[in-house]
Image (cartoon, rainbow, N blue to C red):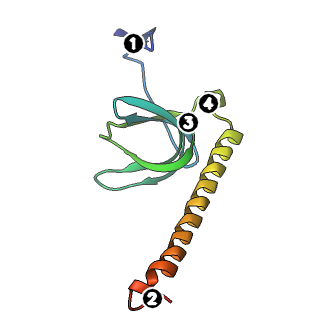
Amino acid sequence: MKEIVEINGVKFEVDLSTAKKVQEFKVGDSVKVLLKEYQSYKSCLGVIIGFDWFEKRPNIRIAYLNVDYSSAQIKTLDYFAGNEDVEISPLGYLGEIEFTQKNIVEMMNREIENKELELKQAQRNKEIFLSTFGKYFSEGLK
């Protein structure tokens, strides 16, 4: 039995009696991760970091790179049967990657600098509190 399958406007004729979908994954494999975000989907680069062989819900542990207009973060997710908000597929070729390593490292460096500034501001706020408001408390922090 043959069936016409359309993917992104391209039609394929597939013989369903012989068609098989076989995907084998191992730790360290690069994958594309399709995540549901609000009303749409986002594709991210990921790496399989482990498998959890739970009896009722075995899953694949994936670390993925979540890049937006100004930041790049490494996040993790569990991929398991019934999870309708995530799909994975093997990474086809490196030309699929939208950002360069240099871009991503620059975004991460900016984020580190911003967090360091936030930390310095929090430390300054603590110093100001102790020097100006400390007199209102019977015991100061030492």
Amino acid type of the residue that numbered disc 2 sits on in the rendered structure = Gly
Residue 5 got which mark? Answer: 1
Dots 1, 3 in contact, CB < 8 A: no
Q: Nearer the viewer, mark 1 or mark 3?
A: 3
Above or below: residue 56 compared with residue 116? above
Mark 1 or mark 3: name the one nearer the start of the chain: 1
Observer-nearest of 51 and 47? 47
Say few, some or many: other residues with alpha carbon within 10 Å of mark 4 (under 14 / 14 to 19 / 20 or more): few
| Placement of the N terminus among the 4 image quadrants | top left
Camera-near label (2 vs 4) is: 2
- First in residue order: circle 2 vs circle 4: 4
Q: Residue at x 28, y 52 (%)?
A: 56
Q: With respect to residue 90, does 49 lie above or below?
A: below
Q: Which mark is residue 98?
A: 4
Q: Report how far apart the C-alphas of labels 2 and 4 lie in the structure.
A: 53 Å
Q: Nearer the viewer, mark 3 or mark 2?
A: 2
Measure the C-alpha gap from mark 3 to mark 2: 44 Å
**Kind of residue at badge 4:** Glu
Q: Position of residue 117 (x, y in %)?
A: 60, 60
Q: CA distance from mark 4 to mark 3?
A: 12 Å
Return the residue nearer the eye: 114 or 26: 114
Q: Which residue is mark 2?
A: 140
Q: Identify the mark at residue 69; answer none if there is no mark.
A: 3
